[in-house]
Image (tube, grey):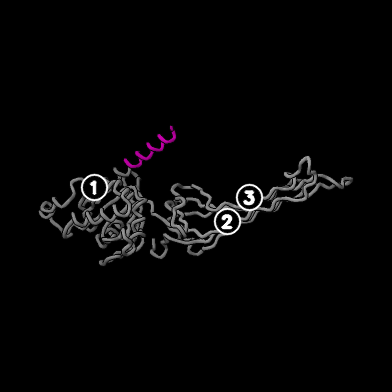
Amino acid sequence: MANGNFVDYVKIYLRSGNGGAGSAHFYRAKGITHGGPDGGDGGRGGHIILKGNRNLWTLLGFKYRKHTKAEHGQNGSENNRFGAEGKDEILEVPLGTIVRDPETGEVEFEITRHDEERILLPGGRGGLGNTHFKSSTNRTPRYAQPGEEGIEAWKILELKVLADVGLVGLPNVGKSTLLSVVSAAKPEIADYEFTTLVPNLGMVQYRDGRSFVMADIPGIIEGAHEGKGLGHRFLRHIERNATLLFCISADADDIKKQYRILLNELEQYNPELLDKPRVLALTRADLVDEELKRMRQHEIPTDLPHRYISAVTGEGITELKDLLYQLIISQREAYDGQQVAMEEE
């Protein structure tokens, strides 16, 4: 995905449709000059609806469509005919899109499922026709309700990338190179920090036609949880990944220290991130020999599954994919079990 095509934050103006006015009509026909009220109701104004689409990965479309207005409902008419409802405006968004109030910053809801629909702004209700106001004391009501006005508002759409595996690491440790080797993704790769400025997604092909999605998250720097650099914008993408793959260069000065920095940034940003399964990939394994690996074994956290990998020689790539896929399957099974239990309740 080209960097220029990835948009994960937009502020848009929305307006739902006005409801149509009710009719204050009276029945008239040949020989009937003083018929009773027969005014129909006005139609509802169009809603603004968000709909999840698993085939979308960016909010790019909203970059060129900052204003959206739904259709107004039609007025009611004679013979108790209702006005037509205004056409809803359905805005398709990637899974993992959250809606925020631009003034308070409060999250209103999140779209997480394909074809999930949520009304962002409801259309105005149609007004009642004069038929509804007929009574024993008022046989000829000459009034009807006006339609309810629609709602206008600015909203912030923010995307948290959804993936099975999220790559976590300091800048320039080989995350983009790993993604390019295990998938068809073509991220920008260069030997300097912050080559990756937006998440890149790749479909990793596994055995027997199975696959999973991997996301290369821009490199984390110390202090990212405080907003240093583009810390908050980077860290939020990690929240929606099922499994976290920590990437540290095998020739790093202090593997344990780098791991602690990454872990601390995640914990300070959102402690729940530490509940996700974690795997350590020691990249650029072709730069260290077996003796050095043995000498540095004490620097690797004992509770963390790890694999030495090399995008150059292919060392450990298959074993890493096996480990990740096992974790992904166990996560999916646990999630399915929770859904079944909730349905039974």
Disc nearer the start of the sequence (2/3): 3
Q: Residue furthest front?
A: 137
Q: Residue furthest top?
A: 344
Which numbered circle lies on residue 319?
1
Which residue is located at x 37 percent, y 36 percent? 337
- Mark 1, mark 2: which one is toward the viewer? 2
The magenta stretch spans residue 267: no
Instruction: Report whether residue 285 is seen.
Output: no
Give the image location of residue 287, x and y in percent.
16, 59
The N terminus lies in quadrant: bottom left
Horizontal relation, residue 51 to residue 254: left or right: right
Residue bearing the label numbered 2: 151
Residue bearing the label numbered 3: 125
Element assignment for label 1: helix
* Residues at circles 3 and 1 in contact by the CB criterion of under 8 Å: no
The C terminus lies in quadrant: top left
The magenta span reads: 330-345
Element assignment for label 3: loop
Which numbered circle lies on residue 138?
none
The magenta stretch spans residue 343: yes
Horizontal relation, residue 242 to residue 310: left or right: right
The amino acid at mark 3 is Arg
Give the image location of residue 315, x and y in percent.
21, 53
Whole-number angstrom distance, CA of label 2 to CA of label 3? 11 Å
Other residues around mark 3 within 10 Å, as few (<14) / some (14–19) / many (≥20): many
Disc nearer the start of the sequence (1/2): 2
Whole-number angstrom distance, CA of label 1 to CA of label 2? 54 Å
The amino acid at mark 1 is Glu
Give the image location of residue 342, x and y in percent.
42, 36
